[in-house]
Image (spheres, rainbow, N blue to C red):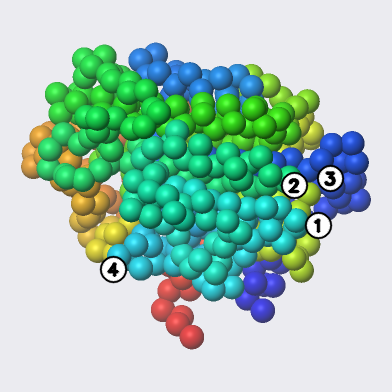
Amino acid sequence: MRLQFLSVALAAIGLIATPATAGEEKRQAPSAQRPRPNIVMIVADDHGTDAIGAYGNRTIRTPALDALAKDGVRFERAFGTASSCSPSRATILTGRQTHSNGMYGLEQLWHHFSVFDQELSLPVALENGGYRTARIGKYHIAPESVFRFSVNLNKGNRAERGELGRSPVEMADVSRSFIEQDGPFFLYFATQDPHRSAPHGQVNKFGNRDDGYARTPTVTYRPEDVVVPPFLPDTPEVRAELAQYYQSVSRVDAGVARLIAHLKATGKYDNTLILYLSDNGVAFPGAKTTLYEPGMRLPLIVKAPAGMRRGEVEKAMVSWVDLTPTVLDFAGVRAPGAKDNGDVEGRSFRALVDRSAYTPRQEVYASQTFHEIQMYYPMRVLHEERYKLIWNIAYPLEVRQAVDLKNSATWLSIGDKPDAKYGARPVSALLKRPQYELYDLQADPNESRNLAEDPAQRERLAAMKAKLIAFLDATGDPWSPNWMGKGE
């Protein structure tokens, strides 16, 4: 009953598509001339737009990703809905916000979050629609009954000991036998790179090893050559860690190159939809686990089957809730028993890739509550074309940092100096935040001037608050002011 209500409410305020017209049904159906596309979704771990050549970084070497962008569409305004690994991945594979699917925080160890048992995931919908499905590398979501893949390529490989995900070239080689089989397939290719690695408390190696990885070229960078993004302080520690981060990103790029080589060698490349994205922003304080731009504005490169857009940049806003409906649209698959891919809160952006008519989004939303279990700090975001509202629900609390960020060389070098500048903000502003943050992203792209108390912005603030609360009500967010305390 609740799911029925949500579908009606979301359609009423335009947050999911209304039932397809006959023409749309025809467009979504598999072509009689072309077989259904294969689908490869590459999900990097903590990779921001700050470290890809195609996004403007002149230092980092990412030839495979740059080539993929030239053969597809690079999205400039693609947004995650959470800045935390498990919650973001759950949204990617369900098309629903974390407060809707129940994945409020990390899956592993004592954190132990998982989505609701009745959720319908992308791999299950595709398998029910006739696709072979496989996953390799990082998983980090639960339960497996919801996120079920027909093949787990990690089995019998080093991923069972947490190693294969750090070697994307090996991941690609393991995937080849699955790729070359007959029939349309969905491959979920999720690297562990460029996530931070243990130990913490020193310049982090981001999974880099002195002896390198099998079949993988080691690409190193000098700290003096890296590009320090504006949200970070320019210190020796930051530069040293960015150099290690870049090296890990280059390892991801090598894996993408090998994977594409296998697709081409097996004759599958031309009819394969490839999506490259990240779960959240780079693992530095001020990005990951925050809903500031470096935490939620993410890379998205989409290479569609032959005959669609190539080498273009798309400026329309898209959200990670849009990924599941987009993939299902390309596949010509609908969720069983539902007219609109279940209760997904996103909508397909296939039209942005195949040149069909498309009404651009006017806003995206984000929802974060936990990362680690001890990191309770619920935030909800309305991001419009120009203005962005962050509602810090637990604003009286001090923000808790993720263990790997709090113990990073970057933070340890400056984090005990609350009056020091950390990028565009003082350190104190990262640790203690007001109830509302309102930013004009056109005039203030680094989100350093909070306009929430500006009398000239009173009407805008009220209107955006009302719109955000309407969204939270429509999506059943228990942190909505109209739902809080109404346990049943």
Residue beneath disc 1: 19
Going by the picture, which residue comes out furthest to the left? 416
Residue beneath the point at 26% across and 24% down = 243
Residue type, mark 2 in image? Gly
> Picture quarter containing residue 361?
top right
Residue beneath the point at 78% across and 43% down = 36
Residue beneath disc 4: 110
User: Is the Cβ of the residue at disc 1 closer than 8 Å to that at disc 4?
Assistant: no
Q: Nearer the viewer, mark 2 or mark 3?
A: 2
- Secondary element under disc 2, as helix, strand or loop, is loop
Residue type, mark 1 in image? Pro
Q: Is residue 213 visible?
A: yes
- Secondary element under disc 3, as helix, strand or loop, is loop
Q: Position of residue 50 (x, y in %)?
A: 39, 27
- Secondary element under disc 1, as helix, strand or loop, is loop
Q: Position of residue 308 (x, y in %)?
A: 75, 27
User: Is the Cβ of the residue at disc 4 closer than 8 Å to that at disc 3?
Assistant: no
Residue type, mark 4 in image? Trp
Q: Is residue 205 left or right of residue 367?
A: left
Q: Position of residue 73 (x, y in %)?
A: 63, 27
User: Is the Cβ of the residue at disc 3 closer than 8 Å to that at disc 1?
Assistant: no
Q: Is residue 102 visible?
A: no
Residue type, mark 3 in image? Pro
Q: Is residue 171 or residue 117 the one in the foreground?
A: 171
**What's the mark number on residue 183?**
2
> Picture quarter containing residue 181?
top right
User: Is the Cβ of the residue at disc 4 closer than 8 Å to that at disc 2?
Assistant: no
